[in-house]
Structure formats: structure tokens, C-alpha cells
Image (cartoon, rainbow, N blue to C red):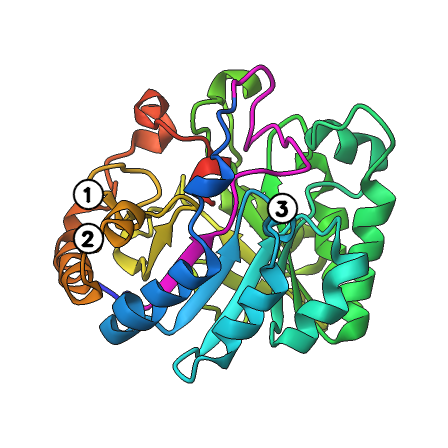
Amino acid sequence: MNQVDYLRISLIDRCNFRCQYCMPEGAELDYILQQELLTNPEILTLLKEVFIPLGFQKFRLTGGEPLLRPGVVDLVKDIAALPQTQDMSMTTNGFFLGKMAQDLYDAGLRRLNISLDSLNPEKFDKITGNRGRSRWQQTWEGIQRAHQVGFDPLKLNVAVIPGVNDSEVLDLAALTLERHWHVRFIEFMPIGNAELFGDRAWVPSEELRQRIRDQWGLMESQVRGNGPADVFQIPGAKGTLGFISQMSECFCDRCNRMRLSADGWLRPCLLNEAGQMDLKTSLREGVEPAQLREQVRQLLLIKPEINFKERDSGTETGKYARTMSRIGG
């Protein structure tokens, strides 16, 4: 079992997109009230008093859409200033980066994962649930702006859904040929929404690799990240291709992360709700950080048993009470 040193922190459950795989159409979303969100000082207290003393050094800010959270730039600056912060990144849909990329970079953020599920504006808007003015152009300009201010390399996350965007795999892979970008193909996780995509709701990573291999060739890359992606490279390309294969190739034994929801629930496994811990309520009720730290330490000890290795390729989705937007991805 890897050392668990990576905490994903959801800052908000709201998003200006309504992507099919994250917030299915027709789903009733009971958003967390503002006063129920962890505050910036509470997040910093948990980092300094609970997680960092337990060896956590890598932090990813997620949502919903984290750039919707008031004070997000200040929080980035405060986390970056912690001497134990070895790595900090953010996952965003990119829509607000045109205006915020420079401030985020100046605050100390250096790595971004941007969701980009299609290069086709109409398809992009369909996937993201947009029925009004197209969001494609502003999102694409946000990606360009982030690269311009210094986020290098950029990671572009693609949730591959059969019959929706799987035909674009080669076009998306081609983004790495002339740019120092990392494109990561993610096997779609049918959590509570498999019925939207038919009997086969995900495409195995090896099938995608074979398509790319047939077009250009493919070799394993020397680049490695903090997460579970298997990294490859088209020969001669400036960027890399990552494959996150949680459905076809279980990587529970390599898991090095926990997830903290926007309302303060610590979750040791994305696919299993066993072992969750309500840190926010304990903190607000005056439980000493040292006691919380010991509780989290005990949870870390049983994490290998909590990892949901017997998920049967996502068929037991009815057991998951929260959508991906509430969990934080």
C-alpha cells in the first residue's frame, strides 16, 4: 500500500456547468448551504493540525467548480505558503481562467487540471448541459490564458463516454504533439447515471491506447504524476497521454489519497462510503485537533480494507449517496 500523502479538498459543490457524467439531467441537487461549507480558516486548521502532521504534503483543490468559491485566491496563497506543501494543484472546468489565471499563478498555484471533454463546440455544450450561449470559446480561451501566464504543463482531463465523445480520442491526443500539454483519458465512472449511456457506459483504456498506437505509435513515458494515471507518449510529441483506468484496471492498491468534501466529510475511498468522518462538526463542537488527528490516523490504518476493490465495474451504483459533484471527483 502506498503512503497516503495526497488530500483532495472540495471547496464547493456548485458548478456553472452541469456535465452529464457529474450531474445527470433531471437529478435533484440539494446544494450545501454557505454556512455549512468549511471556511478558509477551518481548512487551514485541518491542514496544519491534522493532515500535515500525518504526512500529507500534496493537495488538490476541487469542486463542483472551485473558482466559484469566494476567497479562493486567498486560500491558494495560504496553502502555498505552508512550508510543508510539496505540491498543490487545482481541477477546474476552465471557464473562469481567462480572468483568474494570473491571480492564481501569482498566489502560488502552478498546476491545473482542466476538464475538456470535446473539441467540438456543439458537442461540448451538450456534454456540459448548456442550453444558452456556447461556453466553448471562453473555456478554450481560458486554457490558452493559463498556458500563457505560466501553467506548464497543463493537464486536460477527458471523461470518455461511448457514443458521445469517444470518436474524438485521436483529435484530443493530437493536442500533445506540438504543445507541452498532458491529455488524460479517464474511463467514465457510471455512479448513479449508467442508464444514461446504455449497456456499455465506459471504454477500456487499452482500446483507446490501441487506436492511438495504430495512428502514431505509442511508448511509455518517463513522466510520472501524483495520481493513478498510466503515462504514455506519442513518439516525438512534446506532451504526454495519461490513462486513468479505474473501471478496467483496478488500482486500489496504488491509492495514495483521501477526499475532504466541501462540508467537511473525510472520505477514504471514492467508491465506498464506509468509514466517512465528519471533521467539520467535530471541529465546530470544540474537539481538539489532536483528537481529530488521532481519529484520522486510525482511519488511515483501515483504508486498505475500505478501498472498494469489488466494485464489479460500477454496477452497484445505487449504493452511492452522493453525485460526483458532491464528492469532489
Distance, label 2 to label 1, CA atoms, is 8 Å
Return the residue nearer the eye: 264 or 283. Answer: 283
Distance, label 2 to label 3, CA atoms, is 28 Å
- The reply to whether residue 179 is visible in this rendering is no
Residue type at tag 2: Lys
Residue beneath disc 2: 303
Residue type at tag 1: Gly
Which stretch appears magenta? 5-28
Distance, label 1 to label 3, CA atoms, is 30 Å
Q: Residues within 10 Å of mark 1 (few under 14, many from 20)?
A: some
Q: Which mark is residue 275?
A: 1
Residue 195 appears at what percent x and percent y? 50, 16
Q: Earlier in the sequence, mark 2 or mark 1?
A: 1
Left or right: residue 176 compared with residue 192 = right
Say if mark 2 contacts mark 1, CB within 8 Å.
Answer: yes
Residue beneath disc 3: 158
